[in-house]
């Protein structure tokens, strides 16, 4: 279908050239109309929709279709729709069986035995077996890409028959089941048949070139087309083994590189069913006023944090960080969270985002304490005029975050702290934060859980060994916190773990490594024909990156 | 040969062209408004560290003549302060570009043939690179700021003056007054500065006045792609860029800043046209 549509576009756009060769005037005008559409919107007009009318079009950013390389939300969305996993994340942070019918754990917590379903078939018709699970784990561990760090604790994996697989861990590792929600099971035979030159010995490139353009999964959708400059097209895999929504989209097109004004334009023309990417509140409010459009809420576990570089003056001083944290005007920030009556976030309660293990309503939300901030500043080693200006960084692609930066600057002016604002494009941002010296004092960013376990946020954020990424821009090099994080991975009892992480969160808060601003709910605009339970009922949301974009659970009535 | 013109006569000739007069008046008003911005803007504090989310996105009204932006700041006030940045950029860039370009042009036009060949190649290489892309590449090496933008635009602008002066000097280097000066033993530097350079001034003035508008445009283009002054400093190009995402609902964000750039550029262009007519008539 996708290729057909592209062919139509090429023919139409090419008709200007063929006019001299005798093509009809109608063809020429059609080509002209499409060219005008491209010029006006920046994207090609969709000539042909899904034949059954169940076409879902959304905007997005480019994700890597290789599930063992992807690390971000767009990659996660592709991963959850093209592949299956032994277990899957569900509402409220639960872990439910998926490919694994059942599993058992050894008494020492170091061996997990999974029994697989025997009715799962890959998109090419091959049966999914334990050998594919073994291949998948070896692939991600060998390549050391994507979410491979989640499997560092796995010592070995072996199949025991076609439908049983045993994972052995070096030591007990509580987040293991959660980690498995990121181990996409790939079709080993298909990948072996599509190896290209590479660095992995017999496995050559481990099929990376192939999986960059095709899929080898058993998920509810297949990859029909992937053009990082334009769009990705998924088509429904009708033989999928789990339940599909009654009017499940038969084709999903993700359009790339579209600015907010264009999103609004094409949505108002009814040519877009879902705006997945984060849009400025003003655009969302304007979309909400259109007939046939409603707002939805994509609640993950993202939190807006202003990370304070603890290895750079003046934020290397605890009292100075306390002054910054107490002096910020939280109430003004909270006033921005309402978008046309829909909440785009809730005030944070410490470093654990809502929906994650250890989150507690007993932790108070932050409120401004201007006098407390001034007193803390007076106690700091930078009291008086001794503090260099705070440098503030945010990704310039996020217009909304600029408001927070300006609010931060204005708040700090009242405390008596000078601030220099310095936005940078995301690519440059990532380079700047690789060392403590080049990381600005304040870095604004959304961070969140990549698996349902709180360890997937806390470890990369606070453990010393994980420093140098966008998660760890506060450069918290603290042996006591490191030890607590390591202990958290060994505690097997869920209640004891919850208590442990609550205590750890308190210790972290007391160090003021960041301003924990708010837990984000990404507001999206949706066509009223689209029913997406995870985006319309917060209780149905699946709190991991991309978890709410499992298209098989959506209904799209015919246009 | 002289290019000096009695000022009253020059003014009379210049004022014969209504368009030139309108241009001069426009530039005068903008310059005065920019210089007096802290005193005449209704909300001078809105040009600095200021947020007022309760008033964000207000359409034009009697309180806010051009409305407020999405931070709650008065756009009219920010435009007047934005004129300051744009004019400062244009003045500094042209000061550097005209001085350096003229110096290189004198060397190329009145130096040895080898010097001329080498310098004209260097100038052609610079001119063959797209100005905007070259400026973006230079800014990309540093943290974007107004000073870096000024340096980058200066780097892409001087070759135009070097080529203009180089060609002018080349065409007059064998004129009688130059040869006479050489015969009486005047030094090359003295001839270049006191005999040749004054003959280039009319062309330089005309080009500089038109270039004021063009430099403002290039600066706005750099800001538009995110390489302008960092927030919260008012910057006309940045204002246009930030508002463009919100068209048509919040039309006043982009339109007012865009119109401000238009006024500034058209004013300088009309002044440049007037000067050109003036000097052409003299010749």
Image: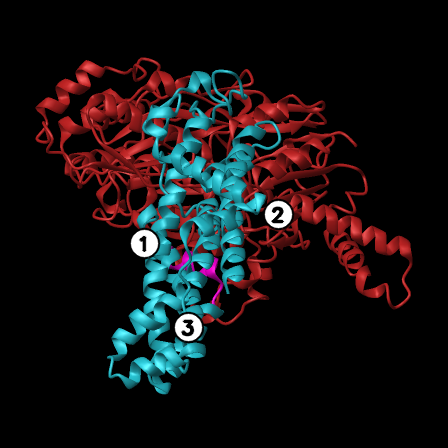
Q: Residue beneath label 2, please?
A: A218
**Would you say residue B142 is visible in this rendering?**
yes
Q: Which chain is red?
A: A
Do the residues indicated by labels 1 and 3 lie within the same chain of the protein?
A: yes
Query: Disc 2: which chain?
Result: A
Residue at position x 37%, y 86% from top? B113
Our reading of the magenta stretch's main secondary structure is helix
Q: Is A191 a magenta residue?
A: no
Q: Which residue is mark 3?
A: B123
Magenta range: B129-139
Q: Label 3 lies in what chain?
A: B
Q: Picture coordinates of residue A550 (x, y %)? A: 59, 36
Q: Position of residue A28 (x, y in %)?
A: 85, 56
Q: Quadrant of residue B94?
A: bottom left
B225 vs A486, nearest the viewer? B225
Residue B140 in sight here: no
Relative vertical location of residue B128 with respect to residue A524 in this rendering, above or below: below
**Front residue (pair A194, B250):** B250
Label the cyan chain with its letter. B
Residue that mark 1 sits on = B142
Q: Quadrant of residue A535?
A: top right
Q: Is B184 placed above or below A333 here?
A: below
Q: Position of residue B122 (x, y in %)?
A: 39, 75
**Which residue is located at x 80 percent, y 61 percent?**
A16
Q: Are marks 1 and 2 on the same chain?
A: no
SS type, badge 1: loop
């Amino acid at each position: 279908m996708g290729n057909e549509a592209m062919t139509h576009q090429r023919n139409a756009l090419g008709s200007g050239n063929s006019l001299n060769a005798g093509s009809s005037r109608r063809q020429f005008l059609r080509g002209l109309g499409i060219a005008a559409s491209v010029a006006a919107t920046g994207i090609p007009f969709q000539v042909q929709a899904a034949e059954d009318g169940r076409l879902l079009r959304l905007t997005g950013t480019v994700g890597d279709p290789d599930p063992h390389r992807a690390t971000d939300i767009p990659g996660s969305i592709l991963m959850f729709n093209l592949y299956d996993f032994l277990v899957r994340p569900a509402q409220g942070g639960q872990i439910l069986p998926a490919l694994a019918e059942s599993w058992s754990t050894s008494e020492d917590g170091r061996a997990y035995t999974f029994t697989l379903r025997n009715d799962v078939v890959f998109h090419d018709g091959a049966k999914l077996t334990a050998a594919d699970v073994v291949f998948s784990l070896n692939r991600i561990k060998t390549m050391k890409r994507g979410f491979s760090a989640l499997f560092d604790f796995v010592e070995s994996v072996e199949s025991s028959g076609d439908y049983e697989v045993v994972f052995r861990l070096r030591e007990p590792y509580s987040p293991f089941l959660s980690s498995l929600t990121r181990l996409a099971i790939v079709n080993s035979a298909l990948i072996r048949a599509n190896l290209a030159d590479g660095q992995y010995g017999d496995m050559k490139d481990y099929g990376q070139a192939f999986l960059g353009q095709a899929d080898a999964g058993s998920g509810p959708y297949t990859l029909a087309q992937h053009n990082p400059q334009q769009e990705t097209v998924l088509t429904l895999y009708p033989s999928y083994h789990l339940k599909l929504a009654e009017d499940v989209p038969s084709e999903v097109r993700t359009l790339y590189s579209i600015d907010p004004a264009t999103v609004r334009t094409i949505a108002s023309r009814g040519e877009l069913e879902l705006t997945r990417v984060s849009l400025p509140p003003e655009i969302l409010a304007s979309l909400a006023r259109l007939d046939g459009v409603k707002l939805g809420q994509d609640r993950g576990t993202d939190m807006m944090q202003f990370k304070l570089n603890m290895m750079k003056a003046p934020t290397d001083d605890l009292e100075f960080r306390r002054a910054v944290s107490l002096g910020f005007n939280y109430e003004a920030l909270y006033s921005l969270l309402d978008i046309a009556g829909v909440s785009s976030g809730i005030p944070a309660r410490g470093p654990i985002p809502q929906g994650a293990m250890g989150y507690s309503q007993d932790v108070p939300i932050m409120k401004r304490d201007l006098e407390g901030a001034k007193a803390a500043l007076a106690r700091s080693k930078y009291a008086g005029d001794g503090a260099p200006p705070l440098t503030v960084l945010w990704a310039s692609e996020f217009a909304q975050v600029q408001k927070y930066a300006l609010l931060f600057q204005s708040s700090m002016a009242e405390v008596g702290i000078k601030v220099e604002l310095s936005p940078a494009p995301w690519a440059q941002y990532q380079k700047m934060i690789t060392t403590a010296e080049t990381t600005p004092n304040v870095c604004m960013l959304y961070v969140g859980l990549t698996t349902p376990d709180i360890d997937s946020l806390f470890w990369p954020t606070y453990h010393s060994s994980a420093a140098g990424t966008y998660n760890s821009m506060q450069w918290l090099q603290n042996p006591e916190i490191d030890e607590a994080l390591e202990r958290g991975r060994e505690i097997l009892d869920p209640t004891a773990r919850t208590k442990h992480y609550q205590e750890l969160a308190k210790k972290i808060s007391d160090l003021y490594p960041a301003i924990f601003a708010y837990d984000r709910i990404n507001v999206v605009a949706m066509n009223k024909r689209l029913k997406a339970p995870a985006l319309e009922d917060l209780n149905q949301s699946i709190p991991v990156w991309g978890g709410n974009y499992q298209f098989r659970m959506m209904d799209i009535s015919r246009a | 040969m002289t290019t000096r013109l009695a000022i009253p006569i020059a003014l009379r000739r210049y004022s014969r062209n209504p368009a030139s007069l309108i241009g001069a008046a426009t530039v005068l008003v903008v310059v005065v408004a920019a210089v007096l911005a802290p005193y005449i803007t209704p909300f001078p504090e809105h040009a600095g560290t200021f947020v007022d989310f309760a008033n964000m996105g207000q359409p034009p009204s009697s309180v806010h003549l051009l409305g407020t932006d999405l931070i709650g700041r008065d756009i009219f006030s920010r435009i007047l302060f934005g004129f300051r940045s744009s004019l400062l950029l244009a003045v500094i860039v042209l000061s550097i570009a005209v001085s350096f370009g003229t110096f290189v042009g004198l060397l190329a036009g009145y130096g040895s043939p080898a010097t001329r060949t080498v310098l004209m190649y260097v100038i052609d290489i610079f001119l063959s690179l797209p100005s905007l892309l070259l400026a973006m590449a230079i800014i990309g090496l540093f943290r974007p700021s107004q000073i870096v933008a000024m340096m980058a635009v200066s780097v892409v602008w001087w070759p135009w003056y070097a080529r203009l002066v180089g060609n002018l000097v080349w065409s007059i280097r064998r004129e009688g007054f130059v040869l006479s000066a050489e015969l009486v033993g005047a030094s090359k530097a003295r001839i270049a500065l006191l005999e040749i350079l004054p003959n280039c001034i009319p062309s330089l003035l005309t080009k500089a006045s038109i270039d004021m508008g063009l430099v403002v445009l290039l600066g706005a283009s750099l800001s538009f792609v995110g390489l302008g002054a960092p927030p919260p400093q008012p910057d006309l190009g940045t204002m246009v860029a930030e508002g463009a995402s919100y068209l048509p609902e919040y039309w006043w964000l982009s339109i007012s800043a865009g119109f401000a750039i238009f006024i500034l550029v058209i004013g300088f262009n009309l002044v440049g046209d007037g000067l050109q007519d003036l000097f052409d008539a003299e010749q």
